[in-house]
Amino acid sequence: MIPPWLFVGFITATLIGALLHLLFGGGAGRFLFFLVLAWVGFGAGQVFGSVSGWQLANLGQIYTIPAVLGALLFSLAGYWLSPPPSNANKSQKSKSRSKEL
């Protein structure tokens, strides 16, 4: 059975990754990219909270603030370092085709 803290952490990180995908767009690959980065960032934030002895706004065994900040930082860094979604190229191609007609 999955421990409750792991389940809540997984759901929280998944929601953060999905929200960022909703904001920044992209295809299925980009969605998976945001999810993986949010999961890894959430875990890194958990480790940081544990090592630093964080005691503010904990949710059971979840170090909420460092974990959420870790998920956001990893996801935003991935967005910044990754190429723009392929939708931008498709919209430019469709505009050029409409000009040709």
Image (tube, rainbow, N blue to C red):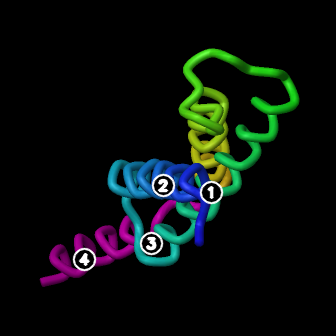
> Given contact means CB atoms under 8 Å apart, are the residues at marks 1 and 3 in contact?
no
Residue at numbered disc 3: 86
| Up/down of 69 relative to 99, above or below | above
Mark 1 or mark 4, earlier in chain: 1
Residue at numbered disc 2: 17
Identify the amino acid type marked 4.
Answer: Ser
**Inter-mark Cα distance, 2 to 3:** 19 Å
Quadrant position of residue 97: bottom left
Identify the amino acid type marked 1.
Answer: Trp
Residue at numbered disc 4: 94
Q: Secondary structure beneath disc 2?
A: helix
Left or right: where 59 falls relative to 81: left
Which residue is depicted at the point 67% across and 52% down?
81
Residue at numbered disc 1: 39
The location of residue 101, given as percent across then percent down, is 12, 84
**Inter-mark Cα distance, 4 to 2:** 29 Å
Label 1 packing within 10 angstroms: few (<14), some (14-19), many (20+): many
Mark 2 or mark 3, earlier in chain: 2
